[in-house]
Amino acid sequence: MALSSLVELWALYNGHCLAWDEGFRKLYVTVDSAAVVLVINKEVEATNPNRALIVACQKIVRREWACIVEHNY
């Protein structure tokens, strides 16, 4: 995974945490990286060095709220 995608994953995670903590329950997010959208929507391999961050992003996106993450072309 490219460094830019890793940075976007961190931004996605931190932004979602902030939105959740502030009480937002409807969230629409666009990201520059199609790879980020793909990785949070599929099973991550156990050997992936970024597995912990990816799984954390997957869990927070799947919380009980209206959350859409899309790639912005």
Image (spheres, grey):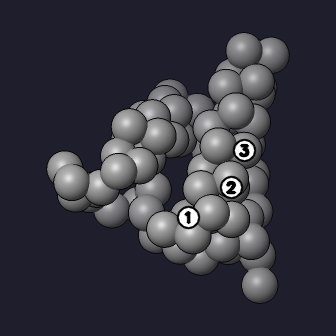
Task: Determine the CA span between mark 2 and mark 3.
Answer: 5 Å
Relative to 66, 57 lies left or right? left
**Quadrant where the C terminus is found in the figure:** bottom right
Secondary element at tag 2: helix
Secondary element at tag 1: helix
Task: Determine the CA span between mark 2 and mark 1.
Answer: 7 Å
Q: Which residue is mark 1?
A: 36
Marks 2 and 1, the one that precedes in the sequence = 2
Q: Can you give x and y, in whole percent of width and height, for residue 48 in the image?
A: 30, 55
Mark 2 in CB contact with mark 1 (< 8 angstroms) = yes
* Residue at (59% x, 56% y) in the render: 6
Relative to 65, 21 lies left or right? right
Q: Give, as a three-letter code, the residue at label 3.
A: Ala
Q: Which mark is residue 8?
A: 2
Q: Can you give x and y, in whole percent of width and height, for residue 29 in the image?
A: 74, 54
Q: Is residue 7 above or below residue 14?
A: below
Residue extending furthest toward the left = 46
